[in-house]
Amino acid sequence: MEKAVLRKLTLLCVICGLAGLALLGMTVVRDGKREWKHYQEEYRELLLKKISRDRNPAFYQRVAGMKPEIRQVVVGEWNEVERCTSCHLGIDDPLFAGAGQPFTAHPDPELLKKHPVEKFGCTICHGGQGLATTYAGASHKTIADWPVPMVTKGLMQSRCGVCHKDFEAIGADKLIKGRELFKEMHCAGCHKIDNQGGVVGPDLSAFADKDPGSFDYANLEGGHSKQAWVMEHFKNPKKVSPGSPMQLPALNDQQIECLSSYVLSLSQREFTRQYSARVRADFVPPGVDGIVPETELSATAEDEEGDK
């Protein structure tokens, strides 16, 4: 009886050992097929075609000997560890201007000079999940409730406004237009920004800092992100927030992008000196609480009606 039990236990141990070896082998194979390793190998081959062995043999040999490795940038100011450059290897290399993703150089080299990757990283401007090393994990497409999904192209300037408050100085046309729309539609009658405005609606002073988990996405048709919520809200506030007293005129897509960019830029986060944007000595943040008397609004409306 004991021998039969021992044989069974021995067989079970052998099976478990073989299963463990199989799992270990699968892990090794899977590790060798990781996205970032494939991209680094492809980048090395592309770079070797762009440089000359004769002109700089030492550099050529160094590139030829490149081994796949996780590349990361630690940005203490944001408490961020970013691995974007593990795949976006040519981001600051002019040799890769116009190359395909993920190797292409940054489309605005001058902007990148002022925001070097090794100091600022990528996610402070582009959003996304910096620790990830896969396309999906980095939030190139919206991940539900991820605090900072990849910023869509139309809302990129919203990230500029988190640090830069002088929109004119950086030529942020969408932020300028969004701020003007905020004034023109008298949003400050209900919403407060930096102690200016009303108290009927939520204070928007730190809207960019709000946790996306605090938003209700039940009536949202787009992705479950704060960006999508804001865009949809400006299209139809009563649909996104049933019972909302908010009244908005019909806005076109460009106006919605501008207004959304402005609201998404509103942050009260403070930065250390090396990361804070310089402003003109005479810069005064524009107010948002200008109220036009109702009689003037009515006269304007009548004039517009008469011009039609």
Image: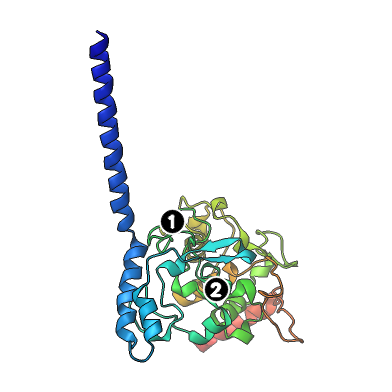
Q: Residue flagged by tag 1: what amino acid is it?
A: Ile
Q: Residue at x 65, y 63 (%)?
A: 204
Snapshot colouring: rainbow
Residue 215: which disc?
none
Q: Which residue is mark 2?
A: 118
**Residue 81 higher or lower than 287, as above or below:** above
x%, y% of residue 29?
28, 52
Kindly tell me whether residue 252 is visible in this rendering: no
**Residue 273 higher or lower than 283, as above or below:** above
Kindly tell me whether residue 165 is visible in this rendering: yes
Q: Nearer the viewer, residue 204 or 157?
A: 157
**Residue 61 higher or lower than 229, as above or below:** below
x%, y% of residue 57?
37, 86
Q: Nearer the viewer, residue 108 or 250?
A: 108
Taking 136 as reference, is 294 left or right? right
Structural crowding at the residue carrying mark 2, measured as other residues with C-alpha within 10 Å and reported as few (<14), some (14–19) or many (≥20)? few
Q: Quadrant of the N terminus?
A: top left
Q: Which residue is mark 1?
A: 143
Q: Residue flagged by tag 2: what amino acid is it?
A: Glu
